[in-house]
Amino acid sequence: MAIKKTTSVSTIADPASLGLFGLALATLVASSQKLGFTSGTSFVLPWIIFLGAFAQLFAAIVDSKRNNIFGTTAFGAYSFFWMGVAFSWLIKSGAFGLEIMNSVDVKQIGVAFIGYLIFSIYMTFVAAEINKVLFIILFLINFLFIGLTLSTFGIYPEFFTPFAGISELALSLVSFYGSAAVILNVQMGRVVLPLGKPLGIIKK
């Protein structure tokens, strides 16, 4: 997810714009369901699988070739998150049979949300040393996982479900901006949309 270019990998295109677009579109569609603008998850699934999962997985693979550990880890981890969510919804809907559907315990996906919250927290500190847009994206992801975790465990879901939806919608909008900034700045050879300097909290 990092936007920095390095001279040793300058011949490989930066995949961040595609990865951020995948994140933006997946969270936009998913937030519409949490906020009550749409209902059900049937038509959410294609977008979280192909944009949330596959687009970010592609970005992770390309960033790996660019020796970009942050982009590889972030895009890869969130790609597999969307795959996990998609399969969880399919299991809950009975797509893999009634026996496995009837054994579902939603608290298990809540535990996974806690794991991703921990991951997102330490990735937020890394993002702060890259640029402000990435920092804001990871910061909002933290709030998303807080809302998802608490609502999944049945803690004030009437509040934390829309809380997660608002966080997700804000995340989508910032990710759209980040995607546009990367491709415009690289393609035009100058800063068209600023990404913001690193915060310098840890790295001096």
Image (cartoon, rainbow, N blue to C red):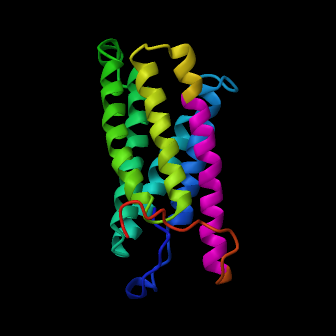
Question: Is the residue 64 above or below the residue 104 in the image?
Answer: below
Q: Is residue 143 above or below residue 99?
A: below
Q: Nearer the viewer, residue 122 or 81?
A: 122
In the displayed structure, 65 sits above or below 162; it is: below
Q: Residue 185 magenta-drawn?
A: yes
Q: Residue at left 37%, top 32%?
A: 113
Residue at 30% x, 23% y: name it.
Answer: 108
Left or right: where 81 falls relative to 137: left
Q: How many marks?
A: 0
Comparing 181 with 86, the one in front is 181
In percent of width and height, residue 128 lies at 45, 59
Quarter of the picture holding the C terminus: bottom left
**Foreground residue among 88 and 116:** 116
On whether residue 161 falls in the magenta region, the answer is: no
| In this rendering, position of residue 54 left or right of residue 29 | left
Q: What are the residue bounds of the magenta stretch?
A: 164-187
Residue 156 appears in the picture as rendered:
yes
Which quadrant of the view contains residue 118?
top left
Residue visible at 52% across and 50% down in the picture: 137
Kindly indicate the quadrant of the structure image that contains residue 107.
top left
Question: Residue 180: x percent and y percent?
Answer: 66, 64
**Location of residue 32 in the rendering, given as x and y in whole percent from the top left corner:** 65, 32
Relative image position of residue 21 (x, y in whole percent): 58, 56
Q: Residue at x 49, y 68 (%)?
A: 15
Left or right of 204 on screen, residue 26: right
The reply to whether residue 42 is in sight is no
Magenta stretch secondary structure, dominant: helix
In the depicted view, which residue is nearer to us: 88 or 132? 132
